[in-house]
Image (tube, grey):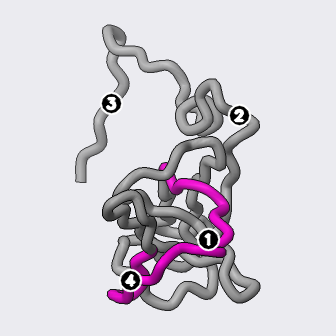
Amino acid sequence: MAFLGTTDDYYEPTISLDREVKGNRPFNVSYLRVSGLLDNNEGIINGDIIVVDIGLKITHEDLVAVKLDGSFRIVRVLIEQEVAYMLENGFKTLMEGIEVCGVITHSLKTIKQAI
């Protein structure tokens, strides 16, 4: 297996998650670790870290974190004729009275745990 070596003619600044995902909105963004997730068909699994922005306007087909029955859930939002529904595990439910925690903007995955 070969690894790319460093080159003298290429430089990329250090990546900062805070700078990349929060940008100019540091007070609107939170990191949440996913646990206890059953099956959401969105590619987000237990152990992932999701980035939730409370300041973004929810639009059609956004993934959002909601608080329902005392726990957080990840749902897709469908907006049809100015009425918002949440799609969770194939079931569409009116979002009336649902506490929305924010729009999910990123999902960070662990590929292999360091020992």
Viewer-side label of 1, 3: 1
Q: Which residue is mark 1?
A: 66
Viewer-side label of 1, 2: 1
Callout 1 secondary element:
strand
Say what amino acid the circle numbered 1 marks: Val
Q: Residue 98: where, in percent of width, then height?
A: 63, 74
Give the crowd class for mark 3: few <14, some 14-19, many >=20 residues within 10 Å.
Answer: few
Q: Which residue is mark 4?
A: 92
Question: Mark 3 or mark 4: which comes first in sequence?
Answer: 3
| Residue name at image x 33 percent, y 18 percent | 7
Q: CA distance from mark 3 to mark 4?
A: 50 Å
Say what amino acid the circle numbered 2 marks: Pro
Along the horizontal axis of the image, is 58 left or right of 73? left
Give the crowd class for mark 1: few <14, some 14-19, many >=20 residues within 10 Å.
Answer: many
Question: Mark 1 or mark 2: which comes first in sequence?
Answer: 2
Q: CA distance from mark 1 to mark 2?
A: 20 Å
Mark 3 touching mark 4, by CB under 8 A?
no
| Residue name at image x 59 percent, y 28 percent | 23
Question: Mark 1 or mark 3: which comes first in sequence?
Answer: 3
- Quadrant in which residue 3 is drawn: top left
Seen from the viewer's position, the closer of residues 4 and 49 is 49
Q: Kindly identify which numbered label has been placed on residue 26.
A: 2
Mark 2 touching mark 3, by CB under 8 A?
no
Q: Residue 1: where, in percent of width, then height?
A: 24, 54
Q: Which residue is mark 3?
A: 5
Q: Which residues are magenta?
A: 86-105
Q: CA distance from mark 1 to mark 4?
A: 14 Å
